[in-house]
Amino acid sequence: MAGLLVSSAAAHVLLLISATTLLGGVLVGSEPTQDKQALLAFLSQTPHASRLQWNASSSACNWVGVECDPTRSYVYSLRLPGVGLVGPIPPATLGRLSQLRILSLRSNRLTGELPSDLSNLTLLRNLYLQGNALSGGFPTSLTQLPRLGRLDLSSNNFTGPIPFSVNNLTHLTGLFIQNNQFSGALPSINPPGLDAFNVSNNRLNGSIPASLAKFPASSFAGNLQLCGGPLPSCSPFFPSPAPSPSISPNPPIPVQKTKKSKKLATGLIIAIAVGAALIGFLLLMFLIVCLRRRRGRQASKTPKPAGAAAAGAAGAAAAGGSFEAGTSSSKEDITGGSVEAERNRLVFFEGGGYSFDLEDLLRASAEVLGKGSVGTSYKAVLEEGTTVVVKRLKDVGVGKREFEGQMGVLGKVKHDNVVPLRAFYFSKDEKLLVFDYYPAGSLSALLHGTRSSGRTPLDWDNRLRIAITAGRGLAYLHESSKVVHGNIKSSNVLLGPDQSGRVSDFGLNPLFGTATPPNRMAGYRAPEVLETRKVTFKSDVYSFGVLLLELLTGKSPNQASLGDEGIDLPRWVQSVVREEWTAEVFDVELMRYHNIEEEMVQLLQIAMSCVATVPDQRPNMAEVVRMMEDMNRGETTDDGLRQSSDDPSKGSDGQTPTTESRTPPIGVTP
Ligand SMILES: *[C@@H]1O[C@H](CO)[C@@H](O)[C@H](O)[C@H]1NC(C)=O
Ligand SMILES: *[C@@H]1O[C@H](CO)[C@@H](O)[C@H](O)[C@H]1NC(C)=O
Ligand SMILES: *[C@@H]1O[C@H](CO)[C@@H](O)[C@H](O)[C@H]1NC(C)=O
Ligand SMILES: *[C@@H]1O[C@H](CO)[C@@H](O)[C@H](O)[C@H]1NC(C)=O
Ligand SMILES: *[C@@H]1O[C@H](CO)[C@@H](O)[C@H](O)[C@H]1NC(C)=O
Ligand SMILES: *[C@@H]1O[C@H](CO)[C@@H](O)[C@H](O)[C@H]1NC(C)=O
C-alpha cells in the first residue's frame, strides 16, 4: 500500500483506497483489471514489433501507450501508432475497454474489417485508424458512438458507400476518410460542429451536397466524378463533347474583369485536374451568357417603342439579378412582339412559383436522371434549395418560332395528373425544358427497380390507382388540350405524393419534325407509327395499353426476356392468353392478393382492346378511363380510387403467403 501511495497524488488517496477495496483489495498496484485482460488479449492475438512489450506483472496503467484515468480504475486512452501491429483487430478485445475515450492505432499494418464490438466504446471521442490496410464497408459500428468527435479512417482500403447514418454522429467535428476506395454518392453529412472534412482520393461520384459545399476543393479532389460545391458545377449543360472547332481553346480570362473573374479563376485551377475540354465549354458559355446579358441591359437602356416596354422591364429585372417568375414572362411574352429582348432567357409559365434565372440553373448541381431518345434529364438543385428537373433536348428540328409556339401550347396544360411544364429556354445551342421534380420517381422505377436501389412490391390497388390516374391525365391531354402525348411509357409516368400517376414528357414530337428518333418509344410504339412516323391519339392509346400490360405482367416492354426473342409485350400476352394460360401472364407478385382476379382480367381486356393492331379498333382515351373506372365501381371512393383493402404490408410483413392460402388464379386447370 505504501508504494502505491507514494506514486499517487495526495488528492487521489481516498478514491484509490475505495477503488482498490471495491476490486477486492488488489494490492499489486491499482489498475483496471478487466481492461488489462482486454489489452492482453488484444496484444496476444495481434502480431506486433518486438519493441512493444507489456509486462503482465506490472500495472497496465504503466504500459507503453496506455493511459488510465486519475484513479487508475479504467483505461482512458490507448495510443499505439506505428508499433508494427499486423493483421485484423481481434473481436472481443478492444471492444471491452468500455471507458475508452481515445484510440489511436494509426500507421500500423492492420487489415480486415473492424470488429463490430467497437460499438461498445460508447464514450469514445477520438478514433485514429489512418494509415493501415483496413478493408470492408464503412464500419457501421462507429456510427453508434454518440460522443465521437474526430474520426480518421484515411489511407486504408475501405470500400462501398458512405452511409447516411454518419449523421448519427452529432458530435462529429472532423471526418477524414480520404485515400480509400469509398464509392457511390456523398450523403448529406451535416453534424452541426463539423469543421474538418476530407473525402479526397476515393471513388465517389455525383453532386456534393450543400451541407458540405463549405469545405475546400482539396477535400473532394481525386474522386471518380464529384461535382458541384467547390468543384466545377455538375451543370448538365456542358457534357464535354469534343469542343467544336469554332471555340477558341484560350480561356478568355483577361477579358473578364467583373465579379465572375474569381469564379473563372477557380474554375480554371480545377479545369487542369478535371479536363480542359469540359471547362473550355463552361467558360465559353459563361462568356456568352455575360455578353448577351450585357447586350440585353444596353438594349433596355436605350429608349424603346411602347410595344417593347414590358420586355425592357424584364431585361432590367434580369440585369438586377433577381427575376420574378411567372409575372413578366407569361404567355404574352412568348407569343407577343417582345420576343426579341426575351432572347436567351428562361421563359416561365404562370403558376410555377419559381424564381431563378439561367445562371442559377447553370450553377446548380445536377445529376443525371435518365437519358432518353430526345435528350437527357437532370435533377438540378439550385443554390437556394429548389429542386427542378431540366430536360436538355437534342436534335431539335424546328426553329425558334415553332418551338415557342409548341411551348405556348404545352405551357397551358394544367391537370392534376399531368406534370406541368414550368419554363423553357431556347437558344441556338441549347433547348431546355424545366419541370417540377417528383422525388417518388417513376412508375418504371417502382415496377422494375433501379440499378442503385432495390424495389418494394407494388400492390394491386396502387397499380390500379396509377393506371386510372395516368389515364385521366392522358385523356385530358387528348380531349381538352388536343395534345398527342407521343411518348407514353412507364418511365414517363411519375408518382405524385398520393401515389397517383402523372404523365410527363408530352407533346414533344412536333419539335423534332420528321426526324423522330427511330428507337423512341421502343416497346410501346404502335405498329403503324413505324411506317407513318407520326404519333396520333390512337397511337397514344396503344402505348397506354402496353403500359397496362406492363402493370399486369410486371414485365418491362423493352426487355428482351419475353420468352421468344424479338416478340413484343402485346404479342407475348396474346400468345399466352390464346393458349388459355391467362393466369400465367399476371405478375407473380400479384398472386399474393386475394379476390383481384376478376379485376385483373377486366383490366387485361381493356389493355388488349387498346393494343388492337388497327388504330380504328382502339377505344379513345376517355373511353379507356371510363372502362377502368367502371371496373371497380362499388368499392371506389369519391375520386374513383379504391381504398386499399388487401395490403399485405399491414399484416404479414411482406411475407409471401403460402401456396395454400393463395386463391387459385382463374384459368388454371390443375
Ligand atoms: C516485469 O515486471 C516485474 C515486476 O515489476 C519484473 O520483476 C520483471 O522483470 C518484469 N519482466 C520483464 C520481462 O520486464
Ligand atoms: C458489448 O455490449 C453488449 C451489450 O451490452 C454485450 O452483450 C457484449 O458482450 C459487449 N461486447 C464486448 C466485446 O464487450
Ligand atoms: C444511431 O445511434 C443510436 C444510438 O445513439 C443507435 O441506437 C443506432 O443504432 C444508430 N444508428 C445507426 C444506423 O448506426
Ligand atoms: C485493397 O483491396 C483490393 C481489393 O479488395 C486489393 O486488391 C488491394 O490489394 C487492397 N490494397 C491494399 C493496400 O491492401
Ligand atoms: C455513380 O457510379 C455508379 C457506379 O459506377 C453509377 O451506377 C451511378 O450512376 C453514378 N452516379 C452518378 C450520379 O454519376
Ligand atoms: C485532403 O486530403 C488530401 C490527401 O491526403 C490532401 O492532399 C488535402 O490537402 C486534404 N485537404 C484538406 C482540406 O485537408
Image (cartoon, rainbow, N blue to C red):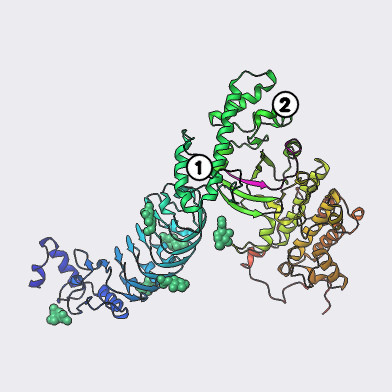
As shown in the figure, which amino acid type bears the numbered disc 1? Pro
Residue 12: x, y in percent?
Answer: 14, 63
Q: Residue at x 40, y 56 (%)?
A: 198
Q: Type of residue at label 2?
A: Gly
Q: Which residues are magenta?
A: 386-402
Q: Quadrant of residue 476?
A: top right
Which quarter of the rendering shows the C terminus? bottom right
Sooner in the amino-acid sequence: mark 2 or mark 1: 1
Which residue is the site of mark 2? 337
Reading the image, the residue beneath label 1 is: 251
Element type at marker 1? loop
Q: Are marks 2 and 1 in contact (CB under 8 Å)?
A: no
- Residue 195, given in percent of the width and then of the height, sits at 36, 50
Q: Is residue 558 above or below residue 403?
A: below
Magenta stretch holds residue 60: no
Neighbour class for label 1 at 10 Å: few (<14), some, many (≥20)? some
Q: Residues within 10 Å of mark 2 (few under 14, many from 20)?
A: few
Residue 554 locus on image (x, y percent): 73, 65
Question: Can the viewer see residue 113 in this picture?
Answer: no
Find the distance from the CA under tag 2 to the CA under tag 1.
Answer: 37 Å
In the rendered structure, does residue 389 fall within the stretch colored magenta?
yes
Residue 511 seen in the current view: yes
Is residue 117 or residue 356 the one in the foreground?
Answer: 356
Q: Secondary structure at mark 2?
A: helix
